[in-house]
Amino acid sequence: MKLFAPVDMTQGSPVKCIVQFTVPMLIGNVAQQLYNTADSVIVGKYVGDNALAAVGSAGPVFNLLLVLMVGISVGAGIVVAQYFGARKREELSRAIGACITLTILASLILMVVAPLVVQPLLRFLKTPDSILGWCNKYLLILFLGVLGPAFYNILSGILRGLGDSVSALIYLLVSTVLNIVLDWLFVAKLGMEGVSGVAYATVIAQFISAGLALRKLSTLTDIFDLKVKYLKPDKFHIGQIIRLGVPSGITQLIFSLSTIIVQQLTNSFGEMFIAANVIVMRIDGFVMMPAFSFGGAMTTFAGQNIGAGRMDRLQEGSRKGTLVAMATSAVLAVLIFLFGRYLMMLFTDTMELVDYSFSMMKILMVGYICMEVTQCLGGVMRGAGDTVTPMIISMVTTVGIRMPLAYLLEYVTREPGASRGNPACIFWSLLITWVLGALITFVCYRTGVWKKRMSKMGVNA
């Protein structure tokens, strides 16, 4: 069936290709966001606001320790897209085998390291004692079952690199529905201790999605070969994936570290603000989905067309795809502004917390449009093989701007005699960072430095 087949993005209208590829990715990203959101809704409604704060506070630690997976996934997507565009079957088979091998190794490392560092990281974050135990238990369950989510993310990244964003979407939707059902069953019906129940539900559901993605890849024998011999460590292809993925992994590491440092400031404002921050970030995750989806589509679009030598399509697709993405986020921002309070009521029955969360959410509205510029143009650079420039931009914005700005704004908003400033400083610093990040990305894209890296990929050789 053509709908579930890999898509050749080197033919037809560039913007049509990008949009058609983005829509399944967008639905899939929204579905994936439902994992954590379902966890938050269930524990918030059935266990309480402190459990909601615990699940949210675990997020930065989980993301920090997943940087290996992020790097492998990005490197895999770029290499697969370019080999697919260049029609190099043998190289594509070896690259996919290298991705699977790297995923197994990275998962084993995480399963060993995570139990040793989770609690010290939570204490470093100044996590309140009232939620520390729940945070620790939630994270340990997720990391001991990390092989499932790791494989799903890598394998779905390979499918997207092949131009098939629909299959990954279907498998994720199945898994998401299962996760929500298991959340409700484990916590509301079977009475499992809140955070443990939702953690087990997440792990089980993502194992199923990983199995479905692997099964799909095994059927694509007309494009590449998924054989045991290709799983043997291949120095060239593993090196290629790591070389392209490391900058993105470092970018995620920098982002996660900056989030952790800002999380210290967030935690200092107490459980109410932590819970409000969790609610805002859960809804923020959905509003950001167009940016990440269009960005991923632009990476595949750029990778396939560069692999095929179709540079004539790249500029048109970059420009029009970014404009469509900006318009999409503008519409979503307006809808959130009008109806956001009703979404927040899904997480808690405490109206004070709902009002508090919505007042913080409104600060971020304009930033979502800016994030489309950063993600789309950064996606083009990554698809071209330049993963370094987006990494540098991330370093500048998160380390050089976001972290010091959050603490500076907190300091200057302190009232006489008060030990803390205005909690809104967390969100104002984020908005300013997004705006500046978009400006820097646009300038870097226009200078064309990333184009010099296209010849270094070795795909067209």
Image: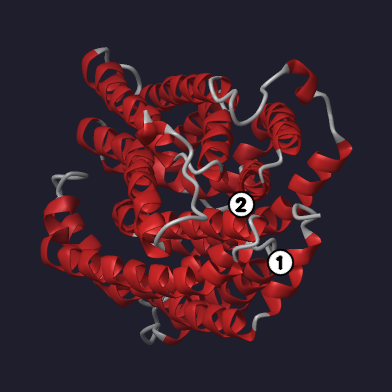
Q: Position of residue 144 (x, y in %)?
A: 59, 24
Q: Position of residue 296 (x, y in %)?
A: 49, 54
Q: Residue at x 68, y 33 (%)?
A: 96
Q: Quadrant of residue 89?
A: top right
Kind of residue at badge 2:
Phe
Image coords of residue 395 (percent x, y): 65, 71
In what quadrant of the picture does the C terminus appear?
Answer: bottom right
Nearer-the-camera pick, 168 or 11: 11
Q: Position of residue 417 (x, y in %)?
A: 40, 82
Q: Residues within 10 Å of mark 1 (few under 14, many from 20)?
A: many
Disc 1 versus disc 2: nearer the observer: 1
Asked if 251 appears above or below 389 in the picture, the reply is above
Instruction: Work out which residue is located at the far front of the displayed protein and give it.
Output: 12
Q: Residues within 10 Å of mark 2 (few under 14, many from 20)?
A: few
Quadrant of res 107: top right
Q: Which residue is mark 1?
A: 388
User: Quarter holding the N terminus?
Assistant: top left
Residue at far right of view: 235
- Pick whichever, 339 or 190, lies toward us: 339
Question: Is label 1 in a helix, a strand or a loop?
Answer: helix
The residue lying toward the viewer, choosing from 117 and 113, is 113
Compared across the picture, whether 204 is left or right of 52 comes to: right
Q: Residue at x 50, y 29 (%)?
A: 137
Residue at 66% in and 55% down:
307
The reply to whether residue 277 is in sight is no
Left or right? Give the position of 283 relative to 147: left
Q: CA distance from mark 1 to mark 2?
A: 30 Å
Q: Which residue is mark 2?
A: 124
Q: Where 401 falls versus 281 (above or below)?
A: below
In this view, 124 is above or below 186: below
At label 1, which amino acid type do we have? Val
